Image: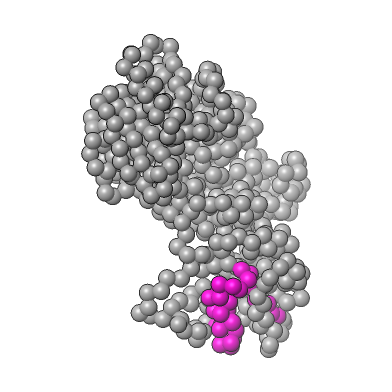
Amino acid sequence: MPSATPSPAWDGTEAEAVALLGWLTDPEAPRLCLVTGAPGSGKTALLGWLAAHGPRSGRSRRRAARMLVPLAGQSALGAAWTIADRLGVVARSPGDLVHALATSEARPAGRAVLLLTDLHAAAEPAALTRLIAELAGVGRIRLVVEARSGTPAPAVLRAEGRVTVVDLDGEPETADGVLVEPAPPLPDLSDPVAVCAADPLLVTTAYVTGAALAGVPGTLDGPEPSARPGEGTADEHGGLRTAWMRAGQSLCREQAPAERALVLLAALGDGADPRLRPALAELAEGAPWRVRWARHRGDLNPPWPGPVTVLGAAGGPLEGTLLVGDPTGTVRLLHEADASPAGRLAHTVPGRITALAPAPDGTVLLLDDRGRLHAVRGTAPRPPYLERLTEAVSATLARHPGTALAAIAGSVVVGDRLGSVHAFGLTGLHQSASHSGRVTAVAAVESETPFVCSGGADGSVRLWTPGRDTRPEPLAERPSPVVSLHATETPHGPLVAAAWADGLVELHRPEGGPTLSFRPGPPVRAVAVTGAGSLLVGTDESLVCLAPRSYGPSGRSGPDRT
């Protein structure tokens, strides 16, 4: 049994600590525990003790992760972004957080316990109370919430359903003896340098609530009227607020101002104040990427290409062309240089397209949502042997649906729901049982030694040369499903881009070199690498093109393994 003796940091009684541990270890207990008390009664200290408390030394018992999230001064949106990041999911809003946790395929080490302090001191206590009540219904987490007695939150949470209450109202200090921390100064919300250097949760709360620096003109704009999100007012601080709301979960992570400036620059729309872009670009000089271009919902010049579900960077007759598929099944062609329109792919595939693979001869192979293969011919005639290969793969997938698709000269690569990767080639069929669970993405590289990359619901990215054993060590592995994968040969050697369901994108060099990472903020739907070595990241409302500042061993890197 773990010891219930509180640490010196906790000034309450052992009975209260025992009550919390009893709730935590009781599988039949409510998922929500409410810690209440008057000011100075030790509520926050008790949650801090619980966050640090572990089994006795020498015992190897694994416990659920305990995550302390202060709510003082926070908006519901900022808290949702913080919780989502801690739990390895991506959420655009509080509602998205609840849905993501209820449907996520992530593999947490035990059920997480959220320790939420100072609910009564939040910027939006009512909205946060509603979010907490909804989170309590999600099976994979438990919540301990601190709220001061006499405030609305305890009564609301008690009325929502089953809740365990730990009341510290025994002998609290008087409210007059409680030291209240002064509110931190609000940054100038129109100054990109100030915003990137400030506490990101403070910035989020200010943008959400419409707070402004009274009487202090902004660096780029003067004071503006307050606004709530989505009310269509002009309080956008030159477009900075819109970009922040677009990329917020990434911006609220612990990082240097240069990294935050990069994310904010990539999220900036084409209607933003023209002074913002050079200011952010200068601040982002220390980041490992530079933004080549970015297109967002609402952009007009060039127009936003629409939501992204699949991406492809073509070679051969389509050299310099990007293929962008949307949820309706439409595949748009874009010029790689600036994402300007270049037409549409003429195909008759019904329903949703889950993968596309441009072949070197200009043919584009498509995988539909039933796991079946379709071929859209290019302008050049296809050799008969490639026609026969495509027909053979199509016939196979009609019987055994695929889950992922890639193509190189003379080969079609398919993943399946059982974790195997199949390379159909002119010399026969090669197979590898690469993953535990569904294969979610595959890529193939035509290099001196052709190889296949595969990503799975198990979170791993693996390399395989058909005809040989799969490499025993994964190229990358994380506790979140791989959602997209692409690889190609570049002047800098082969590059592999991978995206996970928790919003992280990584660019790998299989032959050795730094791993670069990027988090755009929203859920990533697709990634691709261009022939020049640029990274494409597609989301529901953005398509961003990044170029590494250096590819060599001395280049900057920003691996993100959390």
Q: Is residue 37 left or right of residue 108?
A: right
Q: Is residue 80 left or right of residue 556?
A: right
Can see residue 194?
Answer: no
Task: Name the residue located 67 percent from the left edge and 72 percent from the top edge.
Answer: 163
Give the camera-side residue of 241 and 532: 532
Q: Which residues are magenta?
A: 10-38
Q: Is residue 377 left or right of residue 266?
A: left
Q: In the image, residue 213 lies at what x, y percent? A: 70, 53
Position of residue 203 relative to residue 52, above or below, is above
What is the count of numbered marks?
0
Task: Name the residue located 64 percent from the left edge and 64 percent from the top edge.
Answer: 136
Task: Name the residue located 58 percent from the left edge and 61 percent from the top edge.
Answer: 139
State the residue lying farthest toward the front.
399
Can see residue 215?
Answer: yes
Q: In the image, residue 383 lies at what x, y percent? A: 33, 13
Q: In the image, residue 403 lies at what x, y percent? A: 44, 37
Q: Is residue 350 left or right of residue 359?
A: right
Position of residue 453 relative to residue 474, above or below, is above
Please state, as top left, top right, bottom left or bottom right, where the N terminus lies in the image: bottom left
Task: Identify the colour scheme used.
Answer: one colour
- Residue 401 inside the magenta-drawn segment: no
Please state, as top left, top right, bottom left or bottom right, where the C terminus lies in the image: bottom left
Location of residue 121 (image quadrant): bottom right
Q: In the image, residue 340 lies at what x, y percent? A: 54, 23
- Residue 18 inside the magenta-drawn segment: yes
Give the camera-side residue of 183 and 89: 89
Position of residue 269 relative to residue 248, above or below, is above
Give the camera-side residue of 59 and 438: 438
Location of residue 273 (image quadrant): top right
